[in-house]
Image (tube, coloured by chain):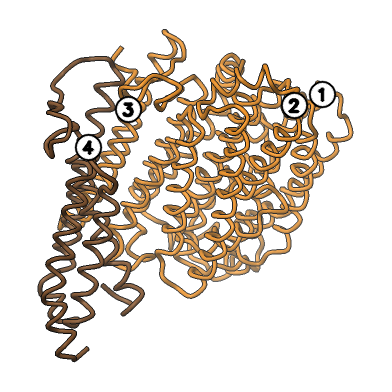
């Protein structure tokens, strides 16, 4: 019974601990505080998972007021799996950042960096857990400001430019989201998702245009924030200029929370039966497939390694939108599974690339022969890249396989070609990095074996993430079943 | 800024502005106003002090670390007080509740008054910091 309080407690622990950080004096103390609070949230989330496994999903009333007036949290299997994913990835990224933060961020700003990470993760958990539209909007605003903060913290010219672009576009996104809430509120008179859902089931025939407008506003607003293809223009700048730990968090977690919010709105507020009558899902399907192809094509043209990975995020977000757009339960399940697999993989890739960039340069040509100097790091990168391309056992393969099955289920066979083409394009930009790193007489000339390798202690968090990728791949059946069961 | 008139007038005015801000914070649960409005007024008083008396004197009185600690302290207090109320309400246990008092008194309304004070402190400090960031580029 007491486990019901844990999701709210997680958010509160993270928020309260974040404001202790500016007060403490020693650098060691606030670093410890940051990792301890994040680790505690992982433990609390896992115990909630065990509770939900036996007692099922539940609504949690925040404060003293019942549902239509007060705020509610809805904690189900999917929410808690994503909560564990977020806190786990964040704690590993924080652990990794202890060894790299001094080189990338000015010294007096390090404590604010950890403060922002804590606020960011708390607000993302809030978006995932909340059952109240306006409450989610508040968390979305908090997460927008915090994620802009962790980009600009490097305090270089290009950072400020990238952040301004990011800030303007994502504020536009949250504005559209707020407008969507306004339209839906004006016809249902509720902000609680369950109540809106019940109300809409009765009145949706009368207000078809209003529902269409608000659906479009939600889709575009959250699409800007989660880099749906033509709205992705802020992403490459922001993700490639940020410190590598920030890029890992932004790419792995921040985008995912917004896309999960979109899934929640389509499923729990409008329900699939209503959404299918409008063309919104087709829009998601088409934009998703264009993103899958063009994200990869744009990634091929880049010279900076971090921009390559950032454009690869656009392509992978395309897969998630594509899965939602298919409009059947298998597609949605695999979209959520892809959220998990991509979050683990992309954070691994960014951290591995970050440690390679510390030793060499940021261009693809600098990374030639890196496999001899840093074999372990490039090995980690290789596993991540294999998962992105879709080599069996790894989660990238699993999600592509099931995306194909879901496409056949929805009898949209043409789109199978899109999945195939996108996978091949992924291979085109990931394999040259690996091949030039490990092989080639010219590349390896004059390189000393293991000369730039990092100590195992510093690589441990990334290694754990890699193990996580492989484990998710092996236990895919269980995860997919749990998501599928909780979806309906 | 050197001007005797400004100097003398603001010497007289700043305490009144701050007193008015405190009044609005403390009457937040009784009349229009509250933590945010009162905090902005106090912040305006601090900004006036900084403009009139100059950077050095303001930094002597309103030290950056002191204000930051004050702000973080009130944020933590807010989090703990409201979090306690959230958890107690959410899990349906009836532990200690702040007594509600007589309606119309200053000491009434349960948690609203302490929370308003916390908000007032945070807002006034943030307003002051924001002004300094845009006026001089540093706090």
C-alpha separation, residue under disc 2 versus residue under disc 1:
8 Å
Residue on which disc 4 sits: B112
- Are the residues under marks 2 and 3 on the same chain? yes
Dot 1: element: loop
Q: Is residue A376 visible?
A: no
Q: Is residue A221 visible?
A: yes
Query: What shade has chain A been given?
Result: orange
What percent of the width, then of the height, locates residue B45? 21, 68
Query: What shade has chain B been given?
Result: brown
Residue on which disc 2 sits: A327
Q: Which mark is residue A120?
A: none
Residue at 10% in and 71% down: B61
Q: Chain of mark 1?
A: A
What percent of the width, then of the height, locates residue A363? 59, 68
| Mark closer to the observer (1, 4) | 4
In-image side of A209 versus B79 (left or right): right
- Are the residues under marks 1 and 3 on the same chain? yes
| Mark closer to the observer (4, 2) | 4
C-alpha separation, residue under disc 1 versus residue under disc 4:
54 Å
Residue on which disc 1 sits: A410
In-image side of A43 versus A430 (left or right): left
Which residue is situated farthest in the top direction here?
A: A54
Residue on which disc 3 sits: A43
Q: Residue A8, located in which quarter of the rendered image? A: top left
C-alpha separation, residue under disc 2 versus residue under disc 3:
34 Å
In-image side of B43 versus B130 (left or right): left
């Amino acid at each position: 019974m007491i486990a019901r309080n844990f999701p709210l407690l997680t958010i509160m622990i993270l928020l309260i601990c974040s404001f202790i950080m500016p007060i403490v004096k020693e650098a060691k103390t606030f670093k410890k505080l940051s990792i301890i609070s994040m680790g505690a949230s992982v433990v609390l989330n896992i115990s909630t998972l065990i509770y939900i496994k036996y007692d099922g999903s539940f609504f949690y009333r925040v404060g003293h007021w019942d549902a239509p007036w007060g705020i509610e949290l809805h904690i189900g299997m999917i929410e808690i799996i994503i909560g564990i994913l977020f806190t786990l990835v964040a704690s590993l990224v924080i652990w990794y950042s202890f060894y790299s933060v001094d080189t990338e961020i000015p010294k007096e700003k390090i404590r604010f960096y950890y403060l922002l990470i804590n606020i960011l993760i708390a607000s993302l958990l809030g978006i995932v857990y909340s059952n109240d539209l306006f409450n989610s909007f508040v968390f979305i605003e908090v997460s927008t400001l915090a994620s802009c903060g962790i980009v600009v913290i490097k305090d270089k010219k290009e950072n400020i430019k990238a952040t301004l672009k990011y800030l303007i576009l994502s504020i536009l996104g949250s504005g559209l989201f707020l407008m969507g809430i306004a339209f839906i509120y004006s016809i249902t008179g509720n902000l609680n998702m369950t109540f809106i859902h019940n109300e809409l089931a009765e009145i949706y025939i009368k207000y078809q245009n209003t529902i269409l407008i608000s659906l479009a506003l939600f889709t575009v607003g959250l699409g800007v924030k989660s880099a749906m293809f033509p709205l992705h223009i802020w992403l490459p700048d922001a993700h490639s200029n940020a410190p590598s730990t920030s890029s890992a968090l932004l790419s792995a977690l921040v985008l995912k929370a917004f896309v999960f919010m979109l899934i929640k709105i389509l499923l729990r507020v409008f329900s699939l039966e209503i959404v299918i009558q409008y063309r919104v899902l087709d829009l998601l399907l088409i934009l998703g497939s264009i993103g899958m192809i063009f994200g990869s094509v744009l990634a091929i043209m880049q010279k900076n390694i971090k921009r390559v990975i950032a454009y690869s995020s656009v392509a992978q977000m395309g897969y998630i939108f594509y899965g939602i757009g298919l409009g059947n339960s298998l597609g949605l399940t695999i979209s959520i599974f892809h959220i998990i697999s991509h979050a683990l993989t992309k954070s691994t890739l960014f951290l591995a690339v970050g440690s390679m960039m510390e030793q060499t340069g940021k261009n693809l040509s600098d990374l030639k022969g890196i496999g001899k100097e840093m074999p372990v790091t490039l090995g980690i990168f290789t596993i991540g890249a294999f998962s992105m391309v879709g080599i069996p056992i790894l989660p990238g393969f699993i999600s592509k396989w099931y995306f194909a099955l879901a496409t056949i289920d929805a009898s949209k066979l043409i789109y199978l070609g899109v999945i195939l083409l996108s996978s091949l394009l992924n291979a085109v930009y990931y394999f040259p990095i690996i091949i030039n790193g490990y092989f080639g007489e010219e590349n390896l000339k004059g390189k000393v074996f293991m000369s730039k390798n990092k100590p195992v202690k510093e690589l441990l968090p990334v290694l754990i993430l890699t193990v996580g990728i492989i484990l998710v791949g092996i236990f895919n059946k269980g995860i997919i079943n749990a998501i599928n069961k909780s979806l309906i | 800024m050197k001007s005797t008139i400004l100097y003398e007038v603001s010497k007289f005015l700043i305490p009144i502005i701050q007193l008015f801000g405190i009044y609005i914070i403390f009457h937040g649960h009784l009349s229009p106003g509250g933590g945010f409005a009162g905090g902005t007024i106090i912040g305006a008083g601090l900004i006036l002090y900084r403009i009139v008396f100059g950077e050095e004197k303001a930094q002597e009185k309103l030290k950056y670390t002191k204000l930051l600690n004050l702000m973080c302290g009130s944020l933590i207090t807010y989090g703990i007080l409201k979090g306690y109320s959230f958890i107690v309400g959410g899990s349906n246990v009836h532990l200690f509740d702040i007594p509600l008092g007589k309606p119309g008194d200053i000491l009434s309304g349960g948690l609203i008054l302490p929370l308003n004070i916390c908000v007032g402190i945070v807002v006034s400090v943030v307003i002051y910091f924001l002004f300094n960031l845009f006026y001089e580029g540093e706090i």
